[in-house]
Image (tube, rainbow, N blue to C red):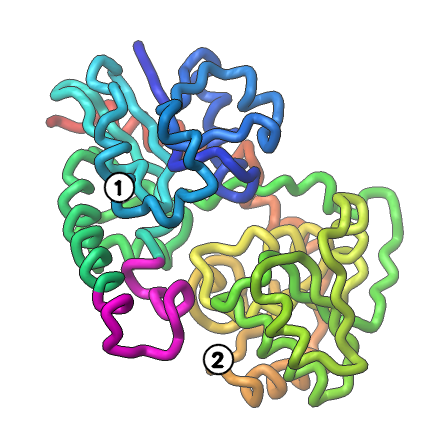
């Protein structure tokens, strides 16, 4: 059986690329098709594959955001008609590949394109206007939405990374999707053979982008006078520092060992944004660290009230402050948090994907 993988682009090694890396174990000889590729950013497990990328387009990879209106045509141009099975991993255009009439196409979708659907305010200017520039952006977005909806007809089976994404998929595409949570590298977070001494700080971690709402965590902890460590990097750093006081510490791009130590030492990981899933949350649970999360988005799949963490109901500082006060009177067992995290192992992920592929093979076209 001839199999090919398709991924939007391979220029950073983050959550989506880690999912692809795990999927590659299913078909060790299958090539990867992508629109942009930076070998230096990829692990050996990806670099050793046969990777097909449009050379002319790849020269423009630094401009890929500006090229977004052209990417549907670029993905449709990839030559995939002769494969028996195509597995795409998509948060942009990869699901829109054109396959042969007998080809089976399974798409693992991280999210419908956020910047043209329900998270436009986090990618466009927050101050809405009727300027010619904004009009052009919305005109192009409308055309992308039309393509995004019509192109899903080429997918035989969707697999979403969370229940939240499956619901969004149904809303925008009118398609059903199974849910298979992404694999998380758990073992390095397990505090095996050592006793954890929890320090007196809360933690937020990940990319500094507006939709993650780290500003709520900073303001809530400053109001309560409790220590918060803000870990990661990203374009929202300058704005976030404006909310910080003496109780907030920024730790920019810690190494892998420091990342684990920070997770294992925290009282709780704060999760104030509406996210598609939340790999950092599972890393926290593996570290015996409970969660304080907004009751929305991907958190609904991994926060069990009183068992793995607690919810706050409104995306406001007041609501988070109230939750932090409740957290101080709550108790969590590290071993139970670790056991829950094991549901998100690579082994569980691959077993579930194999079931999806079996179901795809049983489908009558």
Pointer 2 and pointer 1: residues touching (CB < 8 Å)? no
Which of the two discs, 2 and 1, labels the residue nearer the N terminus?
A: 1
Q: Can residue 121 be found in the magenta stretch?
A: yes
Q: Residue at x 20, y 18 (%)?
A: 81
User: Which residue position holds label 2?
Assistant: 315
Q: Is residue 306 visible?
A: no
Horizontal side, residue 145 vs residue 56: left or right? left
Residue at position x 59%, y 62% in the image:
208
Dot 2 surroundings within 10 Å: few (below 14), some, or many (20 or more)? some
Residue 69 in percent (x, y) is at 26, 47
Please state which of residues 219 and 308 is positioned toward the viewer in this rendering.
219
Residue shown at 65% from the left, 55% from the top? 285
Where is residue 324 drawn, in percent x and y? Answer: 66, 81
Q: Quadrant of residue 164?
A: bottom left
The answer to if 129 sits in the magenta stretch is yes
Label 1 belongs to which residue?
70
Image check: 341 left or right of 84? Answer: right
Residue beneath the point at 14% across and 45% down? 150
In front: mark 2 or mark 1?
Answer: 1
When the figure is inspected, residue 288 is found, relative to residue 176, above or below; the finding is below
User: Which disc is residue 218 wearing?
Assistant: none
Graded by Cα atoms within 10 Å as few (under 14), some (14 to 19) or many (20 or more), the crowding at tag 1 reads: few
- The magenta region covers 115-135
Q: Measured from the top left, where is residue 341 in percent x and y? A: 61, 49
Q: Secondary structure at mark 2?
A: loop
Quarter placement of the N terminus? top left
How far, Cα to Cα, is label 2 from label 1? 36 Å
Would residue 131 be visible to someone looking at this image? Answer: yes
Percent position of residue 175, x then y: 19, 48
**150 to 233, vertically: above or below:** above
């Amino acid at each position: 059986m001839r199999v090919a993988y398709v991924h939007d682009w391979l220029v950073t090694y983050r959550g989506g690329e880690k999912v692809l890396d795990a999927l590659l174990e299913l078909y060790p000889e299958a090539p990867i098709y992508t629109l942009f590729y930076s070998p230096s950013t990829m692990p050996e497990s990806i670099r050793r594959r046969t990777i097909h990328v449009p050379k002319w387009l790849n020269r423009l990879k630094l401009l890929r955001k500006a090229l977004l209106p052209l990417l549907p045509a670029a993905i449709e141009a990839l030559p995939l008609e002769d494969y028996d099975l195509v597995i795409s991993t998509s948060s942009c255009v990869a699901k829109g590949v054109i396959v042969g009439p007998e080809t089976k196409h399974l798409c693992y979708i991280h999210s419908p394109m956020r910047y043209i659907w329900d998270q436009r305010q986090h990618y466009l200017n927050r101050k809405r206007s009727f300027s010619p520039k904004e009009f052009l952006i919305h005109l192009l977005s409308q055309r992308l939405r039309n393509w995004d909806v019509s192109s899903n007809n080429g997918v035989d089976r969707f697999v979403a990374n969370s229940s939240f994404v499956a619901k969004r998929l149904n809303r925008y595409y009118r398609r059903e999707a199974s849910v298979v949570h992404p694999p998380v590298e758990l073992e390095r977070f397990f505090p095996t053979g050592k006793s954890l001494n929890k320090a007196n700080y809360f933690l937020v971690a990940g990319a500094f982008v507006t939709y993650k709402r780290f500003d709520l965590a900073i303001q809530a902890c400053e109001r309560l006078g409790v220590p918060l460590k803000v870990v990661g990097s990203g374009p929202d750093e300058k704005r976030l520092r404006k909310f910080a006081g003496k109780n907030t510490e920024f730790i920019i791009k810690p190494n892998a060992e420091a990342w684990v130590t920070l997770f294992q030492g925290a009282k709780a990981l704060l999760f104030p944004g509406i996210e598609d899933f939340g790999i950092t949350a599972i890393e926290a649970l593996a570290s015996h660290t409970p969660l304080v999360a907004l009751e929305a988005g991907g958190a609904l799949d991994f926060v069990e009230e009183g068992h793995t963490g607690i919810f706050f109901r409104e995306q406001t500082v007041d609501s988070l402050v109230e939750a932090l006060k409740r957290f101080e009177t709550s108790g969590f067992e590290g071993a139970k948090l670790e056991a829950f995290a094991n549901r998100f192992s690579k082994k569980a992920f691959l077993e579930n994907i194999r079931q999806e592929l079996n179901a795809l093979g049983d489908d009558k076209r």
